Structure formats: structure tokens, C-alpha cells
Amino acid sequence: MPGQDGLWYKDAVIYQVHVRAFYDSSGDGNGDFRGLAQKLDYLQDLGINAIWLMPFFPSPLRDDGYDISDYRSVNPTYGTLDDFKAFLAAAHQRNIRVIIEMVLNHTSDQHPWFQESRSSRDNLKRDWYVWSDTDSKYKGTRIIFLDTELSNWAWDPVSKQYYWHRFFGHQPDLNYDNPQVRDEMWSIMKFWLEMGVDGFRLDAVPYLLEREGTNCENLPETHGVIRELRARVDKEFPGRMLLAEANQWPADLSAYFGSGDEFHMAFHFPLMPRMFMGVKLEDRKPITEILKQTPSIPDPCQWCLFLRNHDELTLEMVTDMERDYMYDEYAKEKGMRLNLGIRRRLAPLLDNDRRKIELMNGMLMSLPGTPIIYYGDEIGMGDNVNLGDRNGVRTPMQWSGGWNGGFSEADPEMLYSPLMLNPVYGYQVINVYSQKRFDHSLLSWMKRLIRIKKTNPVLGRGSIEFLYPANHRVLAYTRKLGNETILVVNNLSSKAQAVELDLKNYRGNILVEMFGRNIFPRIGELPYLLTLGPYQFYWFRLRRI
Amino acid sequence: MPEGSILSDDFIRELINVGEVDIVVGVPTHNDARTVGQVVQAVRAGLLKYFPRERTAIVNADGGSRDHTQDLIRAASISDLNVASNVHALRTLHSISTQYPGGQSSGAALHTILAAADLLQAKACAVVSPDSTSLDPEWVERLLRPLLRDGKDLILPVYRRHKFDGLLIRNLVYPMTRAVYGCPVREPYPADYAFSASLGSQLLAQDIWTQEQGRTGTELWMALTAIVNRCKLAQAFLGTKARKEDAPADLVKAMRETAGTIFLSLDSYYSAWSSPREPLEAPCIGCQPTVSLEPTRLNRKRLYDMFKFGVSELEPVFFSILSTATHEELKRLAGMSEDDFSYSADLWARTVYEFAGAYHKAVIGRDHVVQALVPLFRGRAFTFLTENRDTSAEQVENNLDALCQSFEREKPHLLEQWAERK
């Protein structure tokens, strides 16, 4: 088992992966748990120390597994419960923790609960979902999947009432006003916690409850449900972690930490698009502004940072002007846009510019929070916007230049998704095998970055102080924990920059560059002058010798 | 200040922090605290509204203000340290200020702005007057958009002015630019204008900055340079130009800046105006009627008296400058009663051209030539006011057009002034 530090999640580097997409051990064209277990050595070598698994439960897969039809089992395509247990044990053996997905808000319409619920108005499970005679309740609630859904209500021809759904129509929302639902969901979580999972990523938490006259998001009652779950986790499974998916503004987001009695971690959704914006604008303002707006959080809590994930690059938490800018700069083709976001991977978003990819990963690892790496981004995988929905960023992991990119021995037409084939991002060019061979590959560089991040707890737990040099193209900050201080200087510009840093508080310290361990001049009375190449960044350890 | 540089090390440091930009808006100032805050806020609003994605900077070249002009400029910055709650900007906007050496000079101010825009690699640069209190955000767009979108090189303003405002521009600068250089721009000596990086670099590279045209009338020199070099010009209608009511009318200074600069340009650009060329078009973007007719009180009598006095006092000077015929005609005019007085357009055009010739030949000190034109201009201004006293806006325009035609008809007379030298 990994160590017993209750705050382990603060030092973690999380790798997000979909079982289906990672490695197919059975040759049926779908990744599976046995395959994932076989690739744990790769992940251990990469340096990550936690895995976040996307939903692997039985599901009609109309929303890539976020439409669950059985919470206590494994989708047979990915293996068996025993396969999962074996994978979990193997991960723990390597000191890698496992975080699984828990979709609390809704089920698939194929879930037996919903089938029962819709069977008649007086069924015992009728009240497990949200039913109404009209579709005019909760009018103030926004529609999330604007491209596909016209209403948050769907008509059920069987029981002749409307049911509430915040996502797709085939994903009815559970009714958390019903104590039976809350108890059952806890019972499911307990099932997995007893098996040994280290935490849950709780999907779509702001939407658990509905109240008339509100926007049905972030309601006090929703926080009540979370506190109840957290108390149960702390009591029965101390050291396990809850991670919130709440795509909200910082003030609303931070409420999900409560007073340390709700979530341990929450994704910082508004920061992510602003990192892309900052690099494109060559201006730190979007980044520092959103972090300034971010309230402080209770000590045991932590932000979760990411550059890309399985969803579109969400632009819900930006202004209209910012959204237009992001679309124009990052999604010039209409096909790249989905809902209020951009369905692209990291490398294509950054024009496959190695310098920008490194800079963004450098910020990901050095800003306050726990970083998440989306599978394949460590080698610079591309996307296929011609695949529907968000499937373009969920293509098979590219292991080698061989058959099916080393992902599966199945016939190519049997694969769950087409492989990337184009001359820039195709598996023949971008794959683990070829990148393992060279020290200068992106993969090798990511390994170094992760190693440095992991060996410096200050980056996970330290405070942050921005330096605000007059050159706005440079984002500079210090991270501090106890006697340790790290200075981070990022050039967001495509051009070389000179910057003067006010480091008078650190006068007398020598800077030690953390990648090469070379020393830089001692900090004196004058502003510290640094020059940075295009998109270059430095991490310095401050040492008083 | 390093020797031979107009930019201080501190200012260079500020420019480094600004970095590469797309747009610079320059603001030359000297003790303008009363108005510049309003102007620079409107500029900022214009940049945010019309160029939210472009990298922009406001650059103030100050001639040694002792009020808080520079502070007001700097306060327009938008950064992660300085965010007004009612302003939403994608980017940082630097608003920086420097004092150029040598005391107040519009040329040195423009030189500083040009140098800054050049170092910042600005694609377009607008310059606005610190007392343009009627400046609204739309001005920023009208001045800059044609440069960025249409590849123009110079955008000159067109204002709606009172029919008796800008007499020197209307009676001398505009007609002469149109007649001599073939370019009908209404405000060749602009207070609010914009130019491309290429024109800015051209001007910056000229060896004028230690000479007269690099000190005063430099904006006019720039316009004439652009015309002579057949740059792509356009005019932008900016609406009403606020008048500086309390500004002392230093006509000698104004004459130096305008007539002095044009006369100097005739020397430098002889080949450009002495042979026939296609007229240079300067389309007006968004143009509307330019003449307003509000009632106003003017002391015409004083103009008449000063003309008479000047003709009498400066007779020996005019003897050197003017042809006998013109001189005689002016003396005859000086003898006329106020009611009968009329300084005709043809005579005024000939007068100006003969002054240009005298300037060229330096029959007396060139500055004396320019100064001597002042009382005669007053006579012409008297006639302009009289002619247009009760006229409609259209009639004012017609009279102005007739004046320009006189300058065009008399252009051979200007050529003769140069030929005589040969």
C-alpha cells in the first residue's frame, strides 16, 4: 500500500486515463484492466503517483461511460471485478494510488433504478428521480449541452411525465432530496472504498439538487449532501480523498471545500482556459487575475490543476469576449468547437510547439495545486476533430509505430476508435517507444519535470506570492514552504524577454536552476535582471550560502 | 540621458517592459493636467472597444510639465496590479510617460513618440492632442482602422469647425497644399492623426531632428513628406474639434509652424512640385459637413488696423520680398476704408508665393520673411471674415474652393520665383 500520509493528494501527480483507451490485452479492440495493469511500469517510470480512472462501469456508453447502468461492477468490455482488484493491487504495489469516477448526479436511463422508476408513478423508486407534470419548473436553470439539448426536461412516454436531466436526455438526474438515494450512493462508494480505492472524482457535483427560483447550481442543500458524504468517508475511511468536478467561478468553487469538511480537492476550472489565453495573448494578466480572484482554501484542501482532459476545453467560466477570443485563436475550424468549448488535445492546441508545451506543463507543475496529466499528452498526442462528440481526444494510446500503434492486436477495424494516422500526430510518429529512446523527447522531458516536481513538496504544498514585474509577458512567482523557497519565472512570449525582478526580500540568496543545478548570480541590492528565450521558464531554488 | 539619444535609460526600461505592440497612441503634452486625463481615458476606451485583441500602448512625450500631467497618463494603465472595476480588458495596456530633453517642442515630442513606436515595432501609431477634449473612443478607431485594415500610411483628421475657426489653415495651409502638392487634405497640419510603421520609420530616418522642421511644424512636415512620397493617404472625419478658448493666439509662432514649414518644404521637395503630377487622392472616411455656423463675436476691426499698420511699418521689408505690382496693390489696399477693403484670393495667392520665393532666396533672414507675412495674413483674414459673415456653410465651402483655385491658377507665379533664381 502507498504511504499513510493523509495529505498525499497534495504531493500527487495524477495521470488521467480511460481504461478503454490505454492498452488492450485481450485483442478485442478495447483497452482493459489487464492491459492497464501491464502498463503500470510505464506509468511508474513516468513518475506519476496517482491514476484517475474514467468510468469503467457497465454502461450503454452513450456518454463514454458517464451514463452508468450498474455502479457495483465493471463493464465486461474492460474485464471483471477481479481484474480491477488485481490492477488496484498492482498499482498500490508501485505506490500509485487509484482514484475512480463516481457519477453521483445521474444514471443512465438504462439503469434498473430508472427502469423501475419510470414503470409507474407509484413505483417505490419513482421518487429516486425528479419527475414533473410540466416542463416549466426550474426555469432559471441553464442548459449545459447546448449543442444537443433543448431543455433540461425530457418527456417519458411510459409514465407520461417529464424527468429532469442536466446533461443528455438519456441521463436522468437522481433525486438527492430522497434519503434512500443518498444512502444507496454512499453504499456504492463504500463498496469501492472497502476494495481499496484511494479516492473518488465526483462528477457534476453542483447539480445534485433543484430548487425553484434558483439556477439549481451550488445550492446549500447540495453542500449538505457533500458534507454528509465527507463525514462518512472521514469516519470509516480516513486518508481517502474526494475530488470535486464543479465547473464554476472561483468563489462558488471554493465553497466546495466548505470549512475543510466537504471536498479535499476541486478542479480549478477557470484557471485552465486562462493559461491558454495568457500564452496566446503573451500576457500574464488573465492568469494572475483569476488567481487573485481565487479565495484561499482551508489548509488540508488543494486545487487540482489540468491543461487538458477527456472533455472539451471548457469556456463556460470565461467572459463572452474571452470566449470569442479563445474560439478565434484556438478553434478556427467550426468542427473544433463543442458546446461551450474546444475539443482538442494539448499538442494541437499549442501548434505542436515543443516550447509552448513545456512552458504550459511547467506552469501546471509549479502553480499551487495538484497537477493532472491527460493520457497521451506526455508524448504530445494529437486529436481527430472529425470523430463525434469528444471522441477525438479519446483515441487509443500510441505505444509504438507498429500494429495499431501497439495498442491492440485486433484488426484495425475492430478498435473502439480509429487511430491517429496523420503525418504529424499519427502513431508512426508520436509514440512511447520512439520517445523512450531519446533523452530530448517530450516524454523524457516530462519524466524529468515530474521527478523535480515530486521531489520538491514546496511545489505541492507551498504558498504562492506573485512578483508582478513590469514586463507583463513574464509570469513570476515564489513558492514557499518552511525554509524552502522556489522562484518560478515564465516567459509567456514567443520572443526573448528581459525582466527585472524585485527580489530584495531574498537579498543574499544564490539562485540554483533546478533542471541543470547551475548557479546564477547572488541577489543583490538592484532588481535582479534575467533574460529568457521564447516561452522559456526557469525554476530556481533560493539558497543562502 | 545618453548623448545623442532622445530616450532616457529609464524610458528604455519602460519600453522593454511594454515589448512589441500593434498600436501606439502618442500623446504630446506640456502642463496639460486640466484636459489630458479626459483625453487619455477616451483613448483607452477606444482601444478597449475597437482593438481589444491588439497589443497597445499609450506613450506620453512630455515637454517638462510641472503639473500632474504625467501621473494622469500613467493612471490609464491596465495591468494585473492596476485594474479599474469598470474596465474589462483582455490584455495589459501600458500607459507610459517620459520627459524629452530641451524643453517643450512639438517636434521633439513627435520624435520621441516615433522613436518609441519604432522600438516597440508598432504597426500603427496615432497621435492625439492633449487638449482634444471632444475626443471620443470612435476617433481612435477612425484614425487607426484604415492603417491596419486598408494599408494606409497616413490618416489626417477632418473636423467640423466653426466657419471662422482655423483661419490660417483655411487661408494658407490647405489651399497651398492642394495647389502646390496636388493633395486636397483639409488638415495638413494635424493635431490628431495616425501613421503607419513604414511612414514613421521614414520620418525617423530623416535628418531633420536638429533642424527647424524637426522642432516646429513637424506634423505638417510629416504630412508633406507623405504627400511627396506618394504615400497612401486618407482623411477621417472626427466631428467637432473642441476649441481651446483660453489659448493665447501667437500668430507669429503659428506662421512659423505653417508657412515656415511649407516654404521650407518647397526647397526640399522642389522636384516633387515643380513638374506636373497626378493629384494625390486622400479619400475622406465618414465625412460629413465640416462647417458650423454658430454666432460668434469677432474683432475684425483689429485685423484691419494691424494690416494697415504692418503695410506701412514693414515697407522696406516688403520691398525686398514682394514684386512691385503686388507691393503696390497692397499699399492701395491699405489706403482703402474698412467697408471697401477686399484682399482678393488671387492677390493673396500671389503674395504667399512671392513670400515663398523670398524665403527660398533668403532675401532677408528667413524667419523675418515668415514674420512679415503675419500682418498681410491679418488683412486676408479680415476679408475672409467679411466675405463669409452672413453666408451658409455651403457658401463658405464654395468660397474656400474658389480660394484654392486661385492658388492653383497662380502656381506658375510660384514657379517663376524659383526660375528667377536661375
Image (cartoon, rainbow, N blue to C red):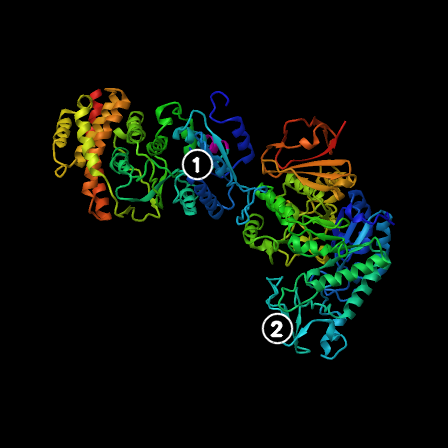
The residue closer to the viewer here, B300 or A56, is B300
Disc 2 marks a residue whose amino acid type is Asp
For residue A225, which numbered disc appears in the image? Answer: none
Disc 1 marks a residue whose amino acid type is Val
Residue A358 drawn at (x, y percent): 67, 40
Q: Which residue is drawn at 54% across and 42% down?
A: B78
* Residue to which mark 1 is pinned: B27
Residue B72 drawn at (x, y percent): 48, 38
Mark 1 is surrounded, within 10 Å at the Cα level, by few (under 14), some (14 to 19) or many (20 or more) other residues, namely many
The residue closer to the viewer here, B268 or A511, is A511
Q: Which element type, helix, strand or loop, lies under badge 1? A: strand
Q: Which element type, helix, strand or loop, lies under badge 2? A: loop
Q: Residue at x 60, y 58 (%)?
A: A339
- The span picked out in magenta is B115-119
The residue closer to the viewer here, A92 or B17, is B17
* Residue to which mark 2 is pinned: A135
Residue A36 drawn at (x, y percent): 80, 52
Q: Numbered disc 1: what chain?
A: B
Q: How many marks?
A: 2
Q: Which residue is drawn at 56% across and 45% down?
A: B83
Q: Is residue A359 visible?
A: yes
Residue A493 drawn at (x, y percent): 59, 38
Q: Numbered disc 2: what chain?
A: A
The residue closer to the viewer here, A408 or B319, is B319
Q: In which quarter of the image is residue A444?
A: top right
Magenta: main secondary structure equals: helix
The span from disc 1 to disc 2 (Cα, nearest Å) is 59 Å
